[in-house]
Amino acid sequence: MLQVKRGRNAGDNPGPVVVILLGPPGCGKGTQSRELSRSLGLIHISSGDLLRKVAREDSDLGHTVRTTMNAGELVSDNLVCQMVLARTAQADCQRGVILDGFPRTMDQARFLCPLLPPRQTIVLDLKMSPTVLVERILGRLTCPACGEIYNIHSRPPRRTGTCDRDSALLGRRGDDSEATVRQRLIDYERQIHPLADHFRELNILQEINADVPPAVLSAQLCALVRTAMGFNDKKVSVSSFAQPRETQRSGQ
Ligand SMILES: [Zn+2]
């Protein structure tokens, strides 16, 4: 899909769009990506899911990825880029894609940026304050069977401790504490800062205050993308979503 941009012309029927979601671990980026995908008919490409899928395949690429991941090493930028590009070339991505977890490094961004459709790309930078992030993550429960994510504060399961879909017992990540969450946020900010700056220079970055209930955020993101990408005539004020936030860049 990313390769075919040049043959298309802007007009009543815009070409494929690319929505890139940035946000710290635990901010609900995956959930928001799935919601956007559902409402807008865009294909959600999670680099993590894609890696795990490829790792299960019986191919040279699958073998390489499997070996790398099993050794606890990071899959190279080049490999991640090729995988994402191959996925976007599939027929179902014609309307557009939501990239979740990609690009993550400047090398990946340098690969991706020349391929992005001009004026049909938006980067949503989800900003969450450390306090809200800690509450979200420490309250989170995950279903080991289907991967559904709950939160004891904002999205409790109907029956305490069990999944609404399959009744599996919900679990909590063992390594989460307030200190680790705060440290992860600092590490994330440090890693993503140059990427965000790069997208800002390209004038495609939109900072979003993500300290709001997930359903509210979903509605805002959806309206924002619809408007920015010319999906329909629903008008919203883009500027109303970029709100001041608590400074997160500590420890630099
Ligand atoms: Zn489940």
Image: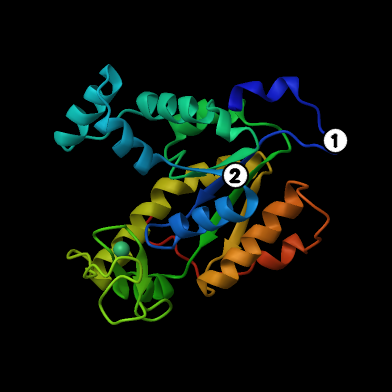
Q: Which quadrant of the view contains residue 172? A: bottom left
Q: Residue at x 54, y 74 (%)?
A: 212
Residue nearer the viewer, 236 or 73: 236
Q: Provide residue 50's location: percent of width, then percent of height.
A: 37, 37
Q: What residue is pinned by disc 1?
A: 11
The amino acid marked with disc number 1 is: Gly
Q: CA distance from mark 2 to mark 1?
A: 19 Å
Quadrant of image for the C terminus = bottom left
Q: Residue at x 32, y 28 (%)?
A: 76
Label 1 element class:
loop
Labels 2, 1: front one: 2
Residue nearer the viewer, 19 or 34: 34
Up the image or down, 71 lies above or below 197; here it is above
Q: What residue is pinned by disc 2?
A: 42
Residue 80 is left or right of residue 219, and the answer is: left
Up the image or down, 44 lies above or below 214; here it is above
Disc 1 under 8 Å from ligand 1? The reply is: no
Q: Provide residue 223's location: percent of width, then percent of height.
A: 70, 60
Quadrant of image for the N terminus = top right
The amino acid marked with disc number 2 is: Leu
Q: Residue at x 53, y 30 (%)?
A: 88
